[in-house]
Image: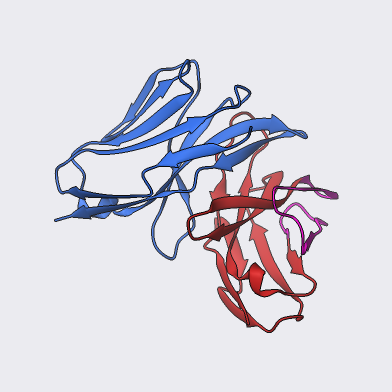
């Protein structure tokens, strides 16, 4: 019940294109949905996040779309650039044992070709 | 601020050896955690702590021990390393207030032969 399912596993996009990564969850107790970006050899870093009372959040070229009834959320990267090539993890946060805990999807490796 | 630091960056162990992965943060965060990252598996929570003297198990705790004697440090101990513990280990920290951004360290790549 605490799984977060992420797709696709890998994605290749041409420069200037739109990258779309999808995630789905089952547990309605999740209350915060962040996306993390990880470059090779580095730790993940928060990219953008959304709470379930909002259907969309945009920060520059990055947008999260959230569908509470379908229990799905997605990351859209507009005008994708080679520098966006990284692994992206969706996550969902749940309050347990005195703290918010993150459950991660399995990741999407994005390659943006020049 | 150095943020979250981890040492060593790389380590090779033989089966049965023990070692400690070090993690420190200088952001005065109450919450600290350890994850392991394996290909196609995402990040899985090993152990976490909500403050000095308080630790608890995550999703994959077997074979690992932790302790938290100070706010800053959260070491991860492998008592008897096994090849299944070959992975990249990340330490993270965050504030307990609200929806907390977790700050990750640079990781330790561990190989157990």
Residue A49, by quadrant, is: top left
- Relative placement, left or right, of A47 versus B29 is left
Q: Residue at x 68, y 67 (%)?
A: B22
Residue A113, relative to residue B56: is it above or below? below
Residue A45, relative to residue B96: is it above or below? below
Q: In the image, residue B74 lies at what x, y percent?
A: 73, 58
In-front residue for pair B109/A5: A5
Instruction: Name the chief secondary structure element in magenta.
Output: loop
What shade has chain B been given? red
Q: In the image, residue B108 lies at what x, y percent?
A: 57, 68
Q: In the image, residue B69 lies at what x, y percent?
A: 83, 57
Q: Residue at x 26, y 36 (%)?
A: A61
Q: In the image, residue A109 lies at what x, y percent?
A: 36, 53
- Relative placement, left or right, of B45 versus A63 is right
In-front residue for pair B42/B76: B42
What shade has chain A been given? blue
- Of all residues shown, which one is farthest toward the right? B53
Residue A1, by quadrant, is: top right
Residue A103, relative to residue B24: is it above or below? above
In-front residue for pair B31/B25: B31
Q: Is residue B42 rendered magenta in the image?
A: no
Extent of the magenta region? B50-74
Count the labels in the image.
Answer: 0
Residue A42, relative to residue B9: is it above or below? above
């Amino acid at each position: 019940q605490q799984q977060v399912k992420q797709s696709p596993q890998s994605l290749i996009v041409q420069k200037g294109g739109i990258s779309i990564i999808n995630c789905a969850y089952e547990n309605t107790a999740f209350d915060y949905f962040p996306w993390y970006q990880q470059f090779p050899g580095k730790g993940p870093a928060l990219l953008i996040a959304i709470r379930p009372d909002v259907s969309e959040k945009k920060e520059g070229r990055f947008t999260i779309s959230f569908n509470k009834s379908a229990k799905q959320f997605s990351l859209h990267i507009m005008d994708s650039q080679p520098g966006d090539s990284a692994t992206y993890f969706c996550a969902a946060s749940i309050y347990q044992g005195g703290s918010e805990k993150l459950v991660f999807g399995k990741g999407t490796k994005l390659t943006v070709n020049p | 601020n150095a943020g979250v630091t981890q040492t060593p960056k790389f380590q090779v162990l033989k089966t049965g050896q023990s070692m400690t992965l070090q993690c420190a943060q200088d952001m005065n965060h109450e919450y600290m955690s350890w994850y392991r990252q394996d290909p196609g598996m995402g990040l899985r929570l090993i152990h976490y702590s909500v403050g000095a003297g308080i630790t608890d198990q995550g999703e994959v705790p077997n074979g690992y021990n932790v302790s938290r004697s100070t706010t800053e440090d959260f070491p991860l101990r492998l008592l008897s390393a096994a090849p299944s513990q070959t992975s990249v280990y990340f330490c993270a920290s965050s504030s307990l207030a609200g929806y907390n951004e977790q700050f990750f360290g640079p990781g330790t790549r561990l190989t157990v032969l």
